[in-house]
Every structure is written in structure tokens, then in C-alpha cells.
Image (tube, rainbow, N blue to C red):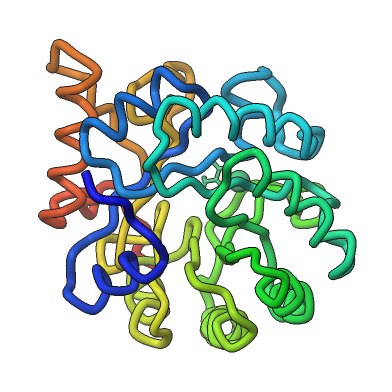
Amino acid sequence: MSRIRTAGLLKMKQEGTKITALTAYDASFSKLFAACGVDVMLVGDSLGMVLQGLDSTVPVTTAEVAYHTRCVRAGAPEAFVIADMPFMTYPDPATACFEAAELMRAGANMVKLEGGEWLVETVQALTQNGIPVCAHLGLLPQSVNVVGGYKVQGRDDDSAKALIKQAQDLQAAGAQLLVVECIPSALGAKVAKAIDIPVIGIGAGNQTDGQILVMHDMLGMNADYLPKFTKNFLAGRDSLSAAVEAYVADVRSGAFPGPEHSFNS
Ligand code: KIV
Ligand code: NA
């Protein structure tokens, strides 16, 4: 598979080819995902939940994300790898740059951070220092203690408009990719139209420019709680490769996510 860079992702959006993404945390899975044609791998701070058994992403550190980024990079030398900047590692532009540098040295191609217009200067600083940025809007798991729970975002007119404005501001600041989490499908479609950079959705309907899922969810490993927007692609299949290939095919064709995996309003 040829090496994907930010320009390649932009071209996919322009050509209408859906971007396929999964979280990855180790070399065995990153190797498998690369072989199955997954375009983007995210070393998510979701590792706090799926690897460490915690109940939020808040305790995760840069050193932990860097460790898993090294593992993912080792298994997939050519992959496009995004690393999450953990909780409170980007309170100001300078701190963000030093923390992000650790993730880039570990093998990331891009870092992701959660938040809106208050991150404009931080995104500018990162980009100016050679660190590509993926923004993240909608449900912001690192803010769970302020928000008071994991809820669908952007349901009313004002918050939907605010989210679109934030996406535009972050793009103007230099962000080259955007993840939107748990928003109504119609808003997912609007955000993808409102900006030029690719928008990758999770629980955001099938009109975004691509999809991402937590790998454990799409392999049906969180048996006691599977969020509405995920699907067990291993069900009825006899190998991990078959499950991942089915995910890639269903994202590309637009079959996933279906209405049953999406929020209406
Ligand atoms: O940490 C993570 O896995 C994420 C995805 C859900 C987008 O941020
Ligand atoms: Na995350």
C-alpha cells in the first residue's frame, strides 16, 4: 500500500473516497490493519479504557500514548498514524508543542487534540513548528467531568452553528483533519461541507468524509456495553482480517454507519 500523507487524505475527500480509520495500540494489530487497507490509525487515549480498564481517558499520559505509538509504528512502518494528546497536555501553545514533540518522536504523523476556538493559537503553534494537527469536536471525552457525562452534542440550532464555526476556525488555524464524535447525522454532513479538510466521524452519520471506530468495539470486545454507533464486524466472520476488511468495505461503500448506528437529532 502506498504511503498516505495529509495531501493524500485531502485528495480522498476531493475525490469522494471515504477514509477508513481505526484505533490501534500495538504492532500486531497495526500490521493487520495495514494489510487490510485501513487508511489511518489513531493511537487514541481511549487506551485508558480498552487497555487499562479505567472509566475515562483523564488519567492517560503522554508517555503512555508515546509508548503505544512506538508499538503501532513498529508494526506498520508506512501507516498514517495519529496520536492523541492526553488530558491537560495542551493548556497553552508552548506546553502543547513540547508534549506533541514526544508523540512525533515516537512515530506519529499527526497529533489530535479535543476542543474548539480556544485552541486556535495552540493549533497555529503546533503547525508552525512542523506538527500536523487533527482537531476533535462534538463529544469531548477529556471534558467528561465538566460536561457531566457522555452525551450526543450539537442537537440544537445554536450548538450546531457553534460547532461549524469552531471547525472553520480550527481549519483556518492550520488543522489538517477533523474528528467529530457523537453528533446528529445532518450536522456531520454540514460540517464536512463547511470545511475543505477531511472530516472523520464516529457516531456522526455516513455523510462525513470518513469513519473511525475503537478497534475493540468493532471486534465486539466490549460485550457489556456496545455504544449505538459501533458495530461488531467480527460477528458471523471467522477471522480478524475478514472483520477488518468488511469494515473497510462498508465504510468505503457508505453502508456503515447505517441509520441504526446514527443519531437523527
Ligand atoms: O481515543 C479515541 O479512541 C478517539 C476516537 C474515539 C476518535 O479519540
Ligand atoms: Na481520544
Location of residue 235 with respect to 178 vertically, above or below: above
Q: Is residue 233 rendered to the left or right of residue 50?
A: left
Find residue 46 and report its horizontal and vertical position in percent.
60, 35
Which image quadrant shows ligand 1?
top right
The residue drawn where x is 67% and y is 28% is 67
Q: Where on the picture, by quarter, is residue 68?
A: top right
The residue drawn where x is 79% and y is 36% is 61
Tell which of 147 and 234 is nearer to you: 234
Tell which of 173 and 168 is nearer to you: 173
The residue drawn where x is 60% and y is 65% is 133
Question: Which quarter shows the C terminus?
Answer: bottom left
Residue 228 appears in view:
no
Q: Where on the picture, by quarter, is residue 117?
A: bottom right
Residue 221 appears in view:
yes
Question: Which quarter shows the N terminus?
Answer: top left
Outermost residue, top side: 238
The residue drawn where x is 68% and y is 74% is 116
Location of residue 123 with respect to 74 vertically, above or below: below
Q: Is residue 63 rendered to the left or right of residue 150?
A: right
Tell which of 217 and 39 is nearer to you: 39
Find residue 217 and report its horizontal and vertical position in percent.
41, 29
Q: What is the total number of numbered labels drawn onto the structure image?
A: 0
Location of residue 183 with respect to 70 vertically, above or below: below
Find residue 129 and report its horizontal and vertical position in percent.
72, 70
Find residue 216 and report its horizontal and vertical position in percent.
43, 25
Location of residue 154 with respect to 252 vertically, above or below: below
Tell which of 46 and 183 is nearer to you: 46
